[in-house]
Amino acid sequence: MRQIDLQQLADNARFNRFHAGILAWCAVIIICDGYDLAVAGIALPSIMKEMGVTAQSAGFMVSSALFGMMFGAIFLGTVADRIGRRAAIAICLALFSCFTAAAGMTNDPYVFSAMRFLAGLGIGGVMPNVVAQMTEYSPKKIRATLVTLMFSGYAVGGMLAALLGKGMLEAWGWQSVFLAAGVPVLLIPFVLKSLPESMAFLARAGRLDEVAAIARRLEPSFVPRPGDSYALQSADAAAGTPISQLFRDGRGFSTAMFWIAFFMCLFMVYALSSWLAKLMAGAGYSLGSALTFVLVLNFGAVIGAVGGGWLADRFHIKYVLVGMYALAAVSITLLGYPVPAPVLFLLVGLAGASTIGTQIVTYAYAGQFYPAAVRATGIGWASGVGRSGAILAPIVIGTLVGMALPLQHNFAAIAVPAVIATVAVSLIRHGRSASAVPDDARVTPAAREASV
């Protein structure tokens, strides 16, 4: 009889078509997710004009999706560890596709806000689940690279919204970009058929035949035998609710540090996305439309995410993140000083790489930190707490802009959270993470083999 360590099997597997399929599906889902989140900002001027709403009301309409994302990340991340990750991802797809399309069929600001809140539940909920899915199945040597490559689809979705939005808005009006967001609902049957369920979930549910079939695809050299049993890491089997497990086995302090890092990073992301163009215009820069800034920020985000993931697989992911947050503090601060246009574009790209890109690498680190059985819960709670930073940022920076402070002060205020996040990540106790469990402390596939 053999006892198979599922996590070690995934860690040591070689990248193959099975991994590529998961990467492709998760990337497509995240691209759709990124489009849904960015579409409101692209269409906002047209919405304000047609509905006749004030800037303050428009801000509430946009922030309604952020509120939904906060609750969706917490609730649907936790639910996934109960009902299965594949079902949770399908629910999220249905929520953000259907309700974003529904928002495009209303001319009432209150109904629009309600639809965007419900869409936000899916937008926020899908993030921790696809990160947990990609983390569970990725080979250890390239895990951070695959997670960040997948999650860079979020920035691709934002660029897609920016590139397609202008033409669609001019041709068919703002409703068209929202109705287009309903197309991903057609992917749900294919996701349910093609995306594998979490092995940790299947093992806990006693569905061992399905575990064996997935393990065979994950590592083709593995040959299941009758009577095989499948083990999780000891931390996965700990008693208690998923939320309480975030604070077990010495993880409590680090969980708090992750929450602080997520809050601070999302504060910077939404402060820049909301106010960068306005601040630059007020400073007298003539750099083209806000679309240019969106593209440069998101292009930088892709470079930062993929580059950060590549570095994290070759060096210690914790210290790579510390360096990326430090870069954010420097690049955002320098945006407040007069520089030539090419340097300004470079700084905007670095700001995108070290905020949006760093957020993606932080997701990857959280995915590696928590055991598989509570991975979606851990990522979901960190993301949910972080969303409060996203909600707060436009309000805080907007207040500072209204005070007519010097440009340097405004960007210094956006850079302060980077310093706090740098400290928080440096204090994470990596020795308590699931990825730090020594290989000899796990059950190897053949270690407990005995004849029956």
Image (cartoon, rainbow, N blue to C red):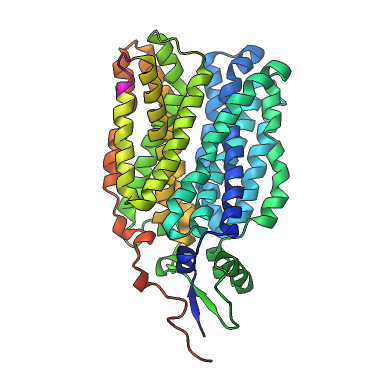
Q: On the rendered structure, is 131 left or right of 253? A: right
Q: In this image, 395 relative to 338: left or right?
A: right
Nearer to me, 319 or 72: 319
Instruction: Tell me: residue 347, above or below residue 150.
Output: above
Name the residue: 26% across, 48% down. Answer: 427
Was residue 25 drawn as part of the magenta stretch in this picture?
no
For residue 165, above or below residue 243: above
| Residue in the image at 42% along x and 58% along y | 141
- The residue drawn where x is 67% and y is 35% is 99
- Say whether residue 36 is visible: yes
**Left or right placement of residue 92 versus residue 377 in this view:** right
Q: Residue, x 34% and y 41% (percent of image)?
A: 260
Magenta highlight range: 334-339
What percent of the width, then of the height, locates residue 397? 39, 21
Whether residue 380 is visible:
no
State how many labels appear.
0
Magenta stretch: helix, strand or loop mostly = loop
Residue situated furthest bottom in the rendering: 452
105 relative position to 154: left or right: right
- Quick one: 330 or 84, which is closer to the camera? 330
* Image position, residue 326 (x, y; %): 29, 35
- Residue 372 percent coordinates (x, y): 47, 60
Instruction: Please state the horizontal and vertical placement of residue 164, each as a whole percent of the image.
Output: 64, 25
The one of 129 and 8 positioned closer to us in this rendering:
8
Q: Is residue 337 magenta?
A: yes
The answer to which image quadrant residue 163 occupies is top right
